[in-house]
Structures are given as C-alpha cells and as structure tokens.
Image (cartoon, helix red, strand yellow):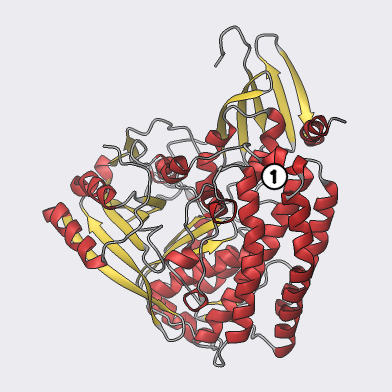
Amino acid sequence: MSAGSHKTYRIPIGPVHVGLKEPVTTWLDVDGERIVKATVRPGSIHRGIEWMARERNPIQVIYLAERICGICSFTHIVAFLRAVEDAAKIEVPIRAQYIRSLVLELERVHSHILWAGVACYTFGYDSAFNLGMLLREKVMDVLEALTGNRVNYGVGTVGGVRRDLTPRAAKAVREMIQFYRREFQTFLDVVTEDPIARARMRNVGVLSQEDAVKYCALGPTARGSGLRVDLRHSSPYEAYGDLGVTPLVPQDYTGEVFGDVYDRFFVRVMEVVQSLELLEKIVDGIPEGPIAWEPKLPKVLAALKAADGIGWGIIEGPRGDDTHVVKLTRGEENVTWWKVRAPTYANAVSWPLMFQNQEIADAPLIINSIDPCISCMERILVSDARAGRSEILTRANLVERCREKTRRLMGA
Amino acid sequence: MTCRPQYVKECKCPDEVMSCIRETLGESLLEMEMRERMDGMPRRVLYRDLWVHLKREGFLKLVDRLMEIDFLHFHVMSGNDDGEVVTLNLHCSLFREAGSGHRLGVTLSIPIPKDDLVFPSLSSRIPGTEYSEREMREMLGIHFEGLPNTDLLFLPENWDEEIKPWRRDETGPSPESIRELS
C-alpha cells in the first residue's frame, strides 16, 4: 500500500447516483496526487432484473430489458430479441431488420455525442459540452418523430418491430444526416484540434492492446486500443451484412495507437460520422415488406410457449457488445432464465489498469472514458487512516480539481 | 498455460474447429451443435455459433487447445440450477479480428454436480473472466478453484452468503425473503 516513506490514502468514489443503471464504487489508493491502485466494486444497485424475468413471458421481458439502460435501451432489446428468436427459430422480415439497424444507429449517434459532450464538460470545456448537447437534440427529435419517444422507444417485438418507417420519418432522418454533415465537423474540430483538450486526454488512462485482449475489452474501449473488433463487421446481424461496416481504429487516421482517453474519444466521434453513412444506406436501401413475423400477439406467445432451447443474442452497442442469453422451455409461458451482460460489465474489469499512475484530477475523465452506464461521483470520502482524519469531497469538488488541472495547463 | 494476448488475423473454417474439439475432448464431449445465423438481403449465413456440451474433466484441456487457435475472447457466463446439476455456460468468441463474418461464437456448456460444485478458474489464462466467476460464485454457489478475488461482486456486503439467489433448491431465496411490490 505505501510506497517508501510516502503515505497512501484510500479514496472511495461512488457508489450511487439516482437514475443511472450501474452505480459503481471505486477505491483509489493514492500517493499524493498519483493513483497507485484502483479497486472497483459494482453492485450498489443490482436490481435482480434477470431474476424478475423468471415470472414474465418473453413479450413482457422486452419492456424489462428496455429499462436496463436509458441510453442504449434499444440495444438491449435487440440483443434480447435475437436471443429469443435464436431459441425459438423465428425469422425476422428484412424490412424489420433494416428498421432495427436504423434505430440502433440513431441510438449510437445520440450515445456517442452525449458521451463526447460530457467528456468535454469533465475537463472544463463547457463550450464544447454545450455545443455537443445542442447537436444531440437533432437526433433525439428524429427518434421522437420515428417512435414517439425520446427514451425507451418501445418499437421492438419478437419477430420484428412495432413501428414502420414512414416516408415522413425517412425524410426526417435524411434531414438529420444533412444537418450533422454540416454541423458536426465543428464539434469534432474544436475538440480534437484543441491543444488543451488534447493535453488532457493524450496519454491519460492508457489501456495497452495486449491488456485490452486479456481483459476482454469491448467496443470503442477496445478499438481505442487499436483492436479491429466490431460485431457489425465480424458477425453481422440484422441489416449490417448488407451495409458493410469497417471497424474504426485510431491508427487508420493518425498512424499510431496510444490506447488513451484521446483515442477512445476519437473513435467515438468518428463513429458518429460512420453512423451517418450507415443511416443513409439504410434509408436508401430499405426494402418493402412486412415488419413483423407475426402481427398477432397471441400467435407469437403460442409459438414461444412451444419453443425449447437456449438462444444467444449479441450485438454491437454504443459502448461495446451487448450479450443476452435466454432459455425457453416447451410448455412454459415464462422465460426459464435470462442472462444479460452489458458492455460496462466487461469494460469495468480493465478500469484498474487505466487508473495506474494517473492523477486524481484525471480520475473522472478515466471513469468516463469507457462510457460507463453509471454516475459514481456523487461524493468522495478522502480518509487518512494514520492521521485519523477524513474529508468529504463532493462531485463538484472533484470536477473542480479536474478543471483546475486544465487551468494549470493553460497557464492561467 | 499462457497464450500470447493477440488475435489471429486469419480464421480457420468452422468444420476444422469442430474436428479439433472432437479430437481434444474425446469421451468428454457430450454434444455439439453448429448454428448458422442468417440475416440480410438476400438471406444468407452471416456468422456461426458453436454450442459444445462437455464434461468438466475435458474443460481446461479444451480451453488450452482453443487458445492455441486464437486468444479466446470471453463474453460472459450464464448458468442455471437444473436439479441434480448446476449447468454453467461460457460464452466466448474465436476469430474476433479475423475479418468480416468470420467470428465464431463458442459456447461451452458444462453440467456440474451439486454435491461437488467446483470448477477451475480461468482467471490466470483470461483475466477478463474475473467478474463472471465472482458472479457465478455468489449467485449459484460454484466454487472456482484458483480465483484470487472471492469478494462479493453484485450482492450487498451484508448479504447472507448461504443464500444463492439463482438457485431453485433449498439454498435459493425462500418465499419469506421475497417482497412483492405489486
């Protein structure tokens, strides 16, 4: 714990912020400002959702799955639906597959812009944060026009989707694509080209490529470490086989990989641009046809009751691959068991590596850099066991420390 | 045994992987199924999932053999109390970085007898399995041999560790401990 004659302090971060799905406690052992060890303890708000599903049929579980996360809610239900469809051998019509991919990409756009904005806010770049939030409203409006909701869209069902893509909604998507092509570059430039933003993110929270493999990192966290891994490419699902997705890695743009917060930032913002291309291909190429395997719900439920087997659904969500496994038993209406693995579950395993030898001021940025579904910095208790004193740092104190570092870098 | 942490860039064909599994497991292989996942326009096979049911004895040997093919990417463990046994499923991937449509989903499904709920930990081979092993330990009561950290992961600190939430027998939650909200 202690390094030479230096005192080591243990700082617990977290655990709870209401309204977010995965609050986490992190204990940081610090020597001065430097983090020497990090320990992560999730579970503060484990809701037993998988257990609750044992008393619900697959259609009811859709709405449970949708509430696992407010940001990637559609990702969760598509992963769940694909697991159910795998177990029950249900074929999804092609138009429904395109609509699912459309909503998934819209969700990726809003998730990545939200993350990028919040990252800027964390290190005190409020202008970029406000610009990001302003830009994000456009995709939220399109999601509302398409589904009726800004969050928890309620458009997925077993064997298809519940809302068709109308010509009016398709027009809104096209307008949104044009809007982002005009406006998003500004956001990209003001952050990636800004020397202070670069200084705050470069060489901070590094995850090497080898560690990303060993610790099973996912999504932009893995791609930020240079791994060309993307389920839309390596095992295409829904319409992605027709769209041709290439994993986006920093070395293709900058010639090298650092595996730091900057690379993770860069991957996400560039993926927004990539998603716009995919959305355009979807709207241009969506085929006509039915949007559900069987529109009558009692027939779907009867087919699910007759199904027997385990199904596996795995898709590339904004934060990484989302895995759902479902067991259906013949003659039983309810799901026998269900396992959900959200990407944060996997990415959090590599957090302690990212914290090593970093400054406390960088801790919020590192926590945010895997885009966790949590807000764990509600309060921080800094305790000094030897001196027997303790001091509570609020989230505001922590953000202020982070911003103070930016001011130091700017020489203010 | 340790494997160099990197992914192969070229895949093997699924049949070759299946023969390799058959050869490695011998009598420890209970059943194997290849599922073709079809999507897109025209509808075609876009990737494959391999489901391998095996005895516990063959597990480590198989993992080591698969790690020679490619670094086994671990997704998650699922499991269920199936009466006499607890079934543990490890969901993994091969050829994650080997090009479009080449990823092979691999599920290893192992029945573990309830009177000997012990399973080898993979944490020294694949550190990314830590959370899942800790979760299966606290939820289903499986003891992972060699797992360095056995602290509770998702359950609260004051949880009675005799109660295994996902078990369906007397070690599971009793009806009195369940509070219905509606």
User: Is B148 situated left or right of A316 in this image?
Assistant: left
Residue farthest along the right direction in this orientation? A412
How many C-alpha atoms fall within 10 Å of the one at disc 1: few (<14), some, or many (≥20)? Answer: many
Task: Tell me which corner region of the image, top left, top right, bottom left or bottom right, holds residue B89.
Answer: bottom left
Above or below residue B45? Residue A40 is above
User: Is B27 situated left or right of A294 in this image?
Assistant: left
Q: Which residue is mark 1?
A: A375
Residue farthest along the left direction in this orientation? B27
User: Is A17 situated left or right of A304 in this image?
Assistant: right
Q: Position of residue B140 (x, y in %)?
A: 39, 46
Q: Chain of mark 1?
A: A
Above or below residue B84? Residue B5 is above
Q: Position of residue A10 (x, y in %)?
A: 63, 22
Above or below residue A329? Residue B38 is below
Element carrying mark 1: loop
Above or below residue A338? Residue A372 is above
Q: In terms of depth relative to the viewer, which is nearer, B37 or B173?
A: B37
| Quadrant including the C terminus of chain A | top right
Task: Tell me which corner region of the image, top left, top right, bottom left or bottom right, holds residue B47.
Answer: bottom left
Instruction: Specify the amino acid type for callout 1.
Output: Ser
Q: Position of residue A311 (x, y in %)?
A: 39, 67
Judge whether residue A335 can be spotted in this image.
no
Q: Position of residue A75 (x, y in %)?
A: 57, 65
At horizontal 22% and vertical 64% (from top left) the residue drawn is: B32
Judge whether residue A50 can be spotted in this image.
yes
Q: In terms of depth relative to the viewer, which is nearer, A117 or A45?
A: A117
Q: In terms of depth relative to the viewer, which is nearer, A99 or A222?
A: A222
At horizontal 79% and vertical 63% (from top left) the residue drawn is: A135
| Quadrant including the N terminus of chain A | top right
Residue farthest along the top direction in this orientation? A5
